[in-house]
Image (tube, rainbow, N blue to C red):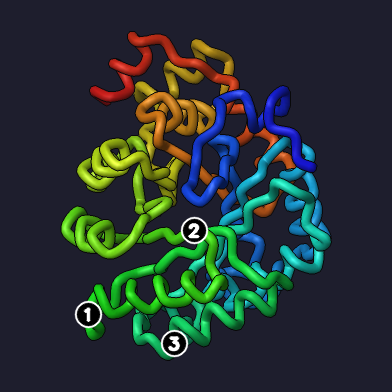
């Protein structure tokens, strides 16, 4: 069984995900365990497997993936490396995007596609039920309620335990909440991009986890900026500071930084133990 308290990933506490699921507040995003352009096999398969094993050793108990990562590569690698899964490990995956080629992502929210995507994920991950299944992106060609309704039906069939959304706005989230219970929302969010602040506040209002993708965005930080100065003052990396800010910004925040490097996953998880002062939070908020 995965231990929560006393592990590096447990330093920021836990969060509930609906349906009795509880995880540490820092997880792992498995998108980058694939090849360049999130396409094909990883350049170093053994390093990718090592990252997954190290994630569990660090106390990470939420691994987030999707059928479109690879496509299919990330899910298969998780199963090959970690099965039989230890008790307490939550595998989250997503459906609703298709990959015509490297670097290309196209929405497909048709009921028949979502059903086929879920069945494929169940088979690749080697499970009878997905712990947390997320609608990857609304499809403009398909009514949103029709796509969500399909996932609700599959949850009623016992194939999904908890249901999440990704890349939604406030209006779509409210529509989904009227239909069913939502465990989590996964939107792009970081110190430099807070366009989903309204969605985050809704998650706080309704007690849902907010899972920020692209949580670090180190490449957008100017040399000599506030992030760099505070990180230097604290003796930590900019990556760790960016993650620590997310954890401090909201109790509903559940970052899942991704990497294909064992050294980087250790660095990322160490951010759970970084506690910012009110002054540091104020400086970062204003940066």
Picture coordinates of residue 115, whole percent (x, y):
48, 84
Looking at the image, which residue is at 42% across and 27% down? 245
- For this view, does 97 lie left or right of residue 65? left
Looking at the image, which residue is at 56% across and 46% down? 21
Report crowding for label 3: few under 14, some 14 to 19, many 20 or more residues within 10 A (C-alpha): some
Q: Of label 1 and label 3, which has the lower sequence position?
A: 3
Q: Which residue is mark 2?
A: 162
The answer to whether residue 31 shows anywhere in this view is no
Looking at the image, which residue is at 75% across and 40% down? 2
Q: Quadrant of the N terminus?
A: top right
Picture coordinates of residue 199, whole percent (x, y):
25, 47
Q: Quadrant of residue 119?
A: bottom right
Q: Quadrant of residue 189?
A: top left
Q: Spatial distance from mark 2 to mark 1, Cα to Cα?
A: 22 Å
Q: Of label 2 and label 1, which has the lower sequence position?
A: 1
Q: Quadrant of residue 216?
A: top left
- For this view, does 38 lie left or right of residue 110? right
Q: Of label 2 and label 3, which has the lower sequence position?
A: 3
Name the element at disc 2: strand
Residue placed furthest toward the bottom: 112
Considering only vertical position in the picture, is 128 above or below 249?
below
Q: Which residue is mark 1?
A: 143
- 170, 127: nearer the viewer: 127
Name the element at disc 1: loop
Q: Quadrant of the C terminus?
A: top left
Picture coordinates of residue 61, whole percent (x, y):
66, 44
Q: Spatial distance from mark 1 to mark 3, Cα to Cα?
A: 14 Å
Picture coordinates of residue 6, whole percent (x, y):
72, 23
Considering only vertical position in the picture, is 210 above or below 234?
below
Q: Which residue is mark 3?
A: 113
Name the element at disc 3: helix
């Amino acid at each position: 069984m995965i231990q929560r308290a006393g592990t590096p990933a447990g330093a920021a506490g836990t969060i509930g995900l609906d349906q009795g699921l509880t995880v540490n507040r820092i997880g792992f995003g498995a998108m980058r365990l694939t090849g360049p352009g999130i396409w094909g096999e990883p350049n170093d398969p053994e390093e990718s497997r090592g990252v997954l094993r190290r994630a569990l050793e660090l106390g990470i108990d939420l691994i987030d993936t999707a059928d479109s990562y690879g496509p299919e590569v990330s899910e298969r690698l998780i199963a090959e490396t970690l099965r039989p899964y230890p008790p307490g490990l939550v595998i989250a995956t997503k459906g609703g995007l298709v990959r015509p080629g490297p670097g290309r992502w196209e929405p497909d929210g048709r009921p028949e596609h979502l059903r086929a995507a879920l069945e494929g994920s169940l088979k690749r991950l080697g499970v009878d039920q997905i712990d947390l299944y997320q609608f990857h992106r609304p499809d403009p060609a398909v009514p949103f309620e029709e796509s969500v309704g399909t996932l609700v039906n599959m949850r009623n069939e016992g194939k999904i335990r908890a249901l999440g959304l990704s890349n939604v706005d406030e209006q779509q989230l409210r529509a989904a909440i009227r239909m069913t219970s939502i465990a989590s929302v996964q939107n792009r969010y970081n110190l430099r991009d807070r366009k989903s602040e309204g969605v985050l506040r809704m998650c706080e209002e309704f007690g849902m986890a907010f899972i920020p993708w692209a949580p670090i965005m180190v490449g957008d930080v100017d040399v000599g900026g506030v992030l760099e100065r505070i990180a230097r003052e604290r003796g930590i990396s900019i990556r760790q500071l960016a993650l620590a800010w997310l954890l401090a910004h909201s109790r509903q925040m559940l970052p899942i930084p991704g990497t294909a490097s064992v050294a980087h996953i250790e660095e990322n998880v160490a951010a759970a133990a970084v506690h910012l002062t009110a002054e540091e939070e104020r400086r970062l908020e204003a940066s």
